[in-house]
Image (cartoon, rainbow, N blue to C red):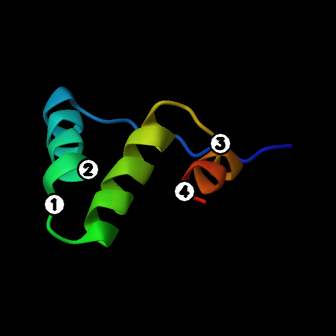
Amino acid sequence: MPRIVSVPLSLEQRERLIFLAKHAKHWRERQRAQTILWLSEGKSVAEVATLQE
């Protein structure tokens, strides 16, 4: 059974993460922001790992 982590975000938090996923200077910060966004959309941990390669 896939593991799903629930990450509720406010609109402000979501907008900030979208900005960071696109514009953060360090690739790890961009990747972390995108990971949180995917988890908040209901993707499983395995799906996120696949998307990140």
Mark 3, residue position: 44
Numbered disc 1: secondary structure? loop
Coordinates of residue 9 in the picture (x, y in percent): 30, 36
Mark 4, residue position: 52
Q: Using the numbered discs, state the Cα–Cα distance from disc 3 to disc 1 in whole angstroms.
A: 24 Å
Tag 3: amino acid: Ser
Q: Which mark is residue 24?
A: 1
Of the image marks 3 and 1, the number of the one nearer the N terminus? 1
Q: Using the numbered discs, state the Cα–Cα distance from disc 2 to disc 4 in whole angstroms.
A: 13 Å
- Quarter that holds the N terminus: top right
* Side (left or right) of 20 relative to 52: left
Of residues 30 and 36, the one nearer the viewer is 30
Numbered disc 4: secondary structure? helix
Of the image marks 2 and 4, the number of the one nearer the N terminus? 2
Tag 1: amino acid: Ala
Q: Which mark is residue 21?
A: 2
Q: Is residue 15 above or below residue 27?
A: above
Q: Give the residue drawn at x 22%, y 40%.
A: 18
Q: Residues within 10 Å of mark 2 (few under 14, many from 20)?
A: many
Tag 2: amino acid: Ala
Do residues under tags 2 and 1 come within 8 Å of each other at their CB atoms? yes
Coordinates of residue 27 in the picture (x, y in percent): 29, 68
Coordinates of residue 36 in the picture (x, y in percent): 40, 49
Q: Using the numbered discs, state the Cα–Cα distance from disc 4 to disc 1 in whole angstroms.
A: 17 Å
Of the image marks 3 and 2, the number of the one nearer the N terminus? 2
Q: Give the residue drawn at x 33%, y 70%.
A: 28
